[in-house]
Image: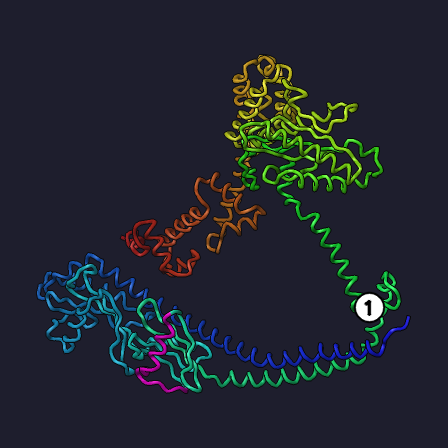
Amino acid sequence: MKFRSPRFLIRLMIISILVGTIPVLALGSFAYYFFSSKIQRQVDQQNVQLLTETELRLEQLFTTIDFYVTQLANSLLLQDAAGWEPTNRKLFQSFQELSVQLSRIQSFEMGISDVFYVNYVNNWVIDNRGVTLLPDRPDHDLLASYASGNQSSYWKNEGTDEGGSVLLIKKTPLASLSPSGVIGIRIPRYQLEKRIEGTGGSDVQLIANSSFDVLAKTEGTLELGDRLSQPFAERVTEALKHSPSAVLRYDEQFFTVVKKSNYNGWYYFSFYSNAEITKDSRTIRWITLLACIGVLLLTLLAATLMNRRVYTPIRRLYEAAGGLSAGGRGNRPDEFQLIGNRIESLISVQDRMNDQIKGQVLQLRELFLFKLLIGEVNPSEAEQKAHFYQLDIEWSRLMVVAVQFSDWKQSKYADQDWERLMFALSHMMCELFPEKWRLEPIIIGQYQIMIVGNDQEEDHAFRQTIVKFANTLNKLVQHNLGLTTAVGVSKPCERFSDVHRAFREASESLKHRSVTVDQPLFFFGDLFPSRDVQVKYPAALEKRLFQAVNEMDLPAAQASLRGITEWLLSENVNYRELQVHLVRILIGLVGDSLYSENPLRGLMHDNKTVFEQLFELNAIDDIEAWFEERVLRPLVNWREEQSQLQYQIITEQMLKLVHERYDTELTLEKCAEELNFHPDYLRKAFRRGVGENFSDYLGEYRLNVSKELLKNTDLTIAEIAQKMNYHNSQNFIRYFKKTVGITPGQFRERLHN
């Protein structure tokens, strides 16, 4: 066979060059713009994150101050202060207490420089300098202006120079339309600037109020005045209409990230230069250009050196595909065309195989139907599980159809063809029977089982549908597979819980068909009009009974036993069958226990064994009561005693850990790691052994130790809090006061007195 090697190699070379050069050139031209914009986005995101941290840090300070001031405004002391006369000497102690309350709010950590209260009823002011009359104050006009406005609480700024400050004004009473006074908190501007310093790559960070007056800013190369320009303010307002944050270009050199606070309407700005971004972009541009040139040269070199080597397997593929071609030598197609035709043929075969298995249902649903048919699903749960597996069918009656091959063992097929035959049979059944009146077929043994149903009042029409289905199916199987089928149909049932009975009826009807009669369809109701197939013993209920006893769940065990007795009543079993079932349950419960040390050794009564006692009972109610009192309850109690003994051992080990390591970061998880138990099991064991939760006991023990330290040592409150593993002494004081009713200092003072 002669090949057009030069033309093919030229074509392969052209394709290699195009494939190698076009993507590299496209990637090179795109990489610069992509990475440049990516760097810009990363810088923007970093500055947004840093600005968010600044906002959260400051607003945490503001909300903390607001919380303390609100508590003071709601206090009885401040409500009484509205009527105090500054000239009344009897109120000296009250003014002193109010001054103490105001000074407690003022702390170095919060940066508060002054806390004051203005009484507009009696015209006096109390602050760090003491109590003064409002008219005597040089700033009385400014203090009087704080009561104006409709807001009961607001932030405002005073001055924009270095000596400026920010005030929180809260009117009192809070719910009153005409305030009797105001509480003011003053924070110097330099305190705010100190809290926004050192936030990363920003050139300047600043805070502005709703009027875009600068409240605080850091030093940087960008020069900003005490008020942002009106055009820039309008751009910021427009950008924040639909977003909590925005990135804007301030000028040719600087960008800014801005966020607006939902707390007080202030604006947070972070200005940064784009010089470094431009520098990085230029570096990326040159690196990308050099990389693209290198990749392009390597691609051209590889295309030149490898084309002949690549051509060898293509030639072999062509020869193999050409050898299978049915066409003449002169009609041979192009190399790639012939290989493509062969690949398309393989894909077509694969698609046909996928179409054949497309109708298969999910494995979990098939497993549920399989268990439902063979009776391994609890009847009380059948409807619920059917709903879970989306089998919410609105049929008035159900039937089970069982189909089997009558003569496949005498046919030409071997055993390995069985699965293929059953798959083909399932496909034919689905095609012939209306989809809305059936579920997917399930293979059980030698049967293909299909649950069918209808919502018609008369069974005659549906019976004719099944007859037509059986006859058509038999003809179709004979034509396609050369086999004959037999179809068994159960009696109608109304619930999913009866499907396993219907399956046994359908399979039973096929077992009793006559081999001498050429008949493809058998109705169980016609063969056995007055006979029901015996229902399979409810093994699921029995298994649940044993599991409930093992889990020490007496109510669940009683419910399972009641379900079994109800089944015995509903099936109307004879006395011999009743004894067999009861002995089976009794052996399952106490078979192994009769040879161990447990309360069941006391089951001997009047020198009679448990089996003799059971056989003397006749009424099902007496049998159920005997099982509950003589078997279930002693077994559950004995298992609970064994479990309680184990709980006691574990509890003692956990108490030892608490007493030895109370001053460490001891948790339930660390106890579980130490004792090699699951935390949930330890939580349950400790609760049963001690009567309270692990965390509550640990807290109470630490509290008792702290009381002893307060009583017998000179350790400070902070040292005791640290010893009790509190990272903050205030948390220890709050917990102590909440539990004991007084603070640790008051407790120690009472002991000394």
Q: Quadrant of residue 325?
A: bottom right
Front residue of this view, candidates 573 and 104? 573
The amino acid type, in three-letter code, at marker 1 is Pro
Residue at 53% in and 78% down: 37
In the image, taking residue 129 as reference, residue 529 lies left or right, namely: right
**Is residue 239 covered in magenta?**
yes
Question: Which residue is tagged 1?
Answer: 333
Relative to residue 655, is residue 311 depicted above or below? Answer: below
In the image, taking residue 67 as reference, residue 393 lies left or right, namely: right
Relative to residue 356, is residue 332 depicted above or below? Answer: below
Residue at 77% in and 33% down: 484
In the image, taking residue 350 as reference, residue 323 lies left or right, namely: right
Front residue of this view, candidates 694 and 241? 241
Residue at 56% in and 86% down: 282
Residue range corresponding to the magenta coloring: 221-241
Please tell me whether mark 1 sits on a helix, a strand or a loop: loop
Residue 218 shows in the view: yes
Residue 544 shows in the view: no
